[in-house]
Image (tube, rainbow, N blue to C red):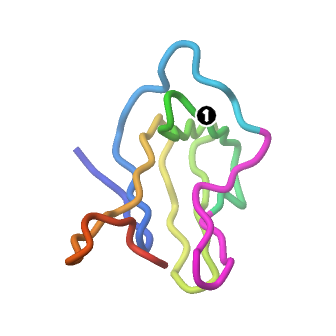
Amino acid sequence: MKAYRQGDVVLKFGKVPVGAKKLPHKVLAEGEMTGHKHQVTEGDAALYEHEGTLFLRVESDTATLTHEEHGPIVLLQGEFEVTIQREYTPDGWRNVAD
C-alpha cells in the first residue's frame, strides 16, 4: 500500500465513509507557523470530513498537492485518509508544526 507524504501531511489509501460531509475547499492543512497551505491545486478532487478525520477523493486520473515550501506531489486517482504527523514532547503528544 502506497502512502504519500508532504511535510507533516500523510495520505494513505482509505475509503471516504458513507455520510461524510463534503467540504467547500481543497485545503488539507494550514501551517501553524507560516500560514502556508497543503492544498490540491490541479485535477478534479474533493475533500470530506467525517468524525474529525479528513478524506480526499481524487476523481481525475491525477491531482496535484502543493505547498509553498515542499515540492508538488502528483496523486493518483483514488480515495485517501488524511493525517497530520504527531510527535512526542515532554509535555505530551502534539501535531508536527509545518
Compared to residue 17, the image places residue 43 above or below, namely below
Compared to residue 25, the image places residue 92 above or below, namely below
Residue at 26% of width from left, 73% of height from top?
Answer: 91
Residue at 45% of width from left, 77% of height from top?
Answer: 97
**Residue 52 x %, y %:** 50, 37
**Residue 1 x %, y %:** 22, 44
Is 59 placed left or right of 42 in the picture? left
Residue at 56% of width from left, 36% of height from top?
Answer: 57
Q: Residue 83 or 60: which is nearer the viewer?
A: 83
Residue that carries the numbered disc 1 in the rendered image:
48
Whether residue 37 appears in magenta in the rendering, the answer is yes
Q: Secondary structure at mark 1?
A: strand
Q: Residue 93 or 63: which is nearer the viewer?
A: 93
Magenta segment? 24-38
Whether residue 36 appears in magenta in the rendering, the answer is yes
**Residue 56 x %, y %:** 55, 40
